[in-house]
Amino acid sequence: MTDLDLEKLARRQSPAAGASSRAAALAAAMQAFDDAEKNATATKGSAEGGRRSSIFNRIWSPIMNRRLLAGSALATLLVVPVAGLVTYELVRNGTIALQVEQTGDAKTRTDAQKPGAETAQVQAENKKQETRTVEQADDAAALLNRERAAQATATQGTSQSAADNRAAEPAPLTESLDGETAVVPQSLSVDRTLTRRVAQPAVTQDTGIMPMPQEDRERFASADPNPVKSVATDPVSTFLADVDTASYSYMRSALLGGSLPEPDSVRVEELINYFPYDWKGPETVEKPFNATVTVMPTPWNKGTELLHIGIKGFETVAAEQPSANLVFLIDVSGSMDEADKLPLLKSAFRLLVGKLKDTDTVSIVTYAGNAGVVLEPTAAKERQKILDAIDTLQPGGSTAGAEGIEMAYKLAQKAFKKDGVNRVMLATDGDFNVGPASDEDLKRIIEERRKSGIFLSVLGFGRGNYNDGMMQTLAQNGNGTAAYIDTLAEAQKTLVEEAGSSLFPIAKDVKFQIEFNPDRIAEYRLIGYETRILNREDFNNDKVDAGDIGSGHRVTAIYEVTPKGSPAVLNDPLRYGKGETADAASRGVGEIAFLKMRWKKPDSDTSELVTMPVTDSNVVPDLDAASADVRFSVAVAAFGQKLKGVSALQDYAYGSILGLAEAAKGNDPFGYRAEFVKLVRLAEGLAGGK
């Protein structure tokens, strides 16, 4: 008989009982009673005198009735820690995954089996379960990170250089305790700089968690490209010297990171001046500059010409360089806790210490939440003491940069060398967030301190919150220079190979002014130097601060000029008059322009002047007739304008820049120009070949 048959029988009504049926049933019942009476003396159950079930109930019931609450609590205290420990060990060894995502088919079948309100309830329960799983994953990841970070900290000091190398290379797959390779869930991955055991998993599991986007806090000094000016109305162009190279290093870092640099971060003159050119220098320090001028056709505009000015400063002999009093002002705030910041900074300063003379002096000031002296003025011959002080630096805290600057200048004044070079070297990512932090506040502080004869160098590190605008403010107003250190090789170039230029100034407040002959030139445009433009009257005003040039420094300036009568002239001629002009006789025969240079000696407040005319003797018939250095600098200028988005270079392809640079590499002992060619290729690819 089936269940269906039983259900049918259960639904049927019972027939009414008849009289004969009642009588038969009553007789059967009476007979059964009589049989039971006859069997009452028979032995029943167990020989022990009681039923086993009754004995169990008498023992168990009091325990359950009286101690249920205490027993449950004791079980909880024992089971929960054990279960937690087992779960943690399974997760730590990669034995189980924290979350398994249901496949689409299985999920569809489940939903089909639970229609209506029941399906909604199941979905709500699933969502709660997913939330609990994610929370468990986060807790387990936090425990794992703390454990492995502690292990890494214990072994961190064994090999600093090896740690730096590991941060830049892929790490192997994690190994489980029994030696078998295990895949680490993405939610449990930790920083590669902490341990080599953790790597990107070969197979990742989708936890449904979107990573938080990194906030981009980088800031640059914004300036539009210089416009085309008419010689009839603006015949004079004035600007200050710029020997900084920070923009080139930042551009390289961006391209190698897989993106084009921000247009505002590109300062074309810093790209040009990054390279060493073989411009002819002056004979004596009494005339600290010499200018090499070349006029040639413009490769990207057939109707214009390039007026190229290459200036080199007097190069002092290393043995004759004065002693240096250096104060390392080092940012050790929490924002410096990245591989390309404080660790790279420490390696860079170690290189510099190895370059110093025994008579030099080094002090170290650090700043985070507040400033402090790590090393009092110490003779460079005590190198190990200085290196030990550098090695102790650790990141942490906010950034009280202004307080650090004040303390560094006081320490520099304490060890001031009257006949030597006194310089504060600020190394930071520029993230000042405690105390005076605006550009104007910092400018005021630096302007007050530069009067003491102490120069300033600014070294930038890292990406993400790099404050280039603030660094430019400090360098330009502190009689200093700015560089961006993105690799140890760049630190070698800036602090070792070019130490003479970086540390020993030969002139300060260097200004340039060029006047164009309206009979020869109709229009001009200065390429780069947008943040270095001065008013015409500032050239003769010794109270106006300007740029500084070190021993052997090279400064290159390029104008795109439009000859009078060229079809490329953009401005209509004036209807009334020609403006202020000198007599034709005083202009000189064959003059195209007139160049003036003004500077002060490092220990003087009075400027000196040197001038030279630009004549037809400086003109070459075509670009190939110019020297390799001139042509290469023109290629760099084109590249910088292309990155910055200058409209004049819109139709000049990266391929043309590449060909110009490759043909003009010339002597390249350090490989800087070969590297530039590679960067042009990278930019071409990232820009889609445009």
Image: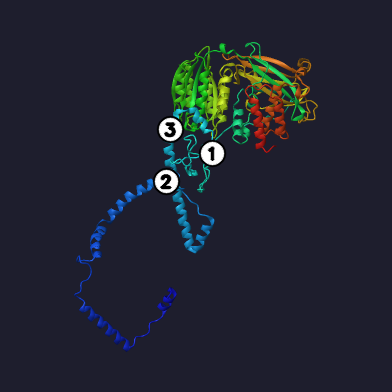
Q: Secondary structure at mark 3?
A: helix
Hey, which quadrant is residue 217 in on the image?
top right
Q: Residue at x 45, y 50 (%)?
A: 133
Amino acid under label 2? Leu
Mark before the other along the chain sequence, 1 or 2: 2
Is the residue under label 2 in contact with that under label 1 (CB below 8 Å)? no
Hey, which quadrant is residue 291 in on the image?
top right
Amino acid under label 3? Thr
Q: In this rendering, is residue 562 above or below 7? A: above
Residue 171 horizontal side relative to residue 244, left or right: left
Q: Secondary structure at mark 1?
A: loop
Residue 558 horizontal side relative to residue 457, left or right: right
Is the residue under label 1 in contact with that under label 3 (CB below 8 Å)? no
Q: CA distance from mark 3 to mark 1?
A: 27 Å
Q: CA distance from mark 1 to mark 2?
A: 35 Å
Badge 3: few (under 14), some or many (20 or more) residues near its Cα, within 10 Å?
Answer: few
Amino acid under label 1? Glu
Front residue of 40 and 6: 40
Front residue of 202 and 298: 202
Q: Position of residue 74 (x, y in %)?
A: 29, 51
Q: CA distance from mark 3 to mark 2?
A: 25 Å
- Whether residue 525 is visible to the viewer of this picture, yes or no, is no
Q: Secondary structure at mark 2?
A: helix
Residue 153, which numbered label?
Answer: 3
Residue 215, which numbered label?
Answer: 1
Badge 2: few (under 14), some or many (20 or more) residues near its Cα, within 10 Å?
Answer: some
Mark before the other along the chain sequence, 3 or 1: 3
Q: Nearer the viewer, mark 3 or mark 1?
A: 3
Tag 2 residue: 90
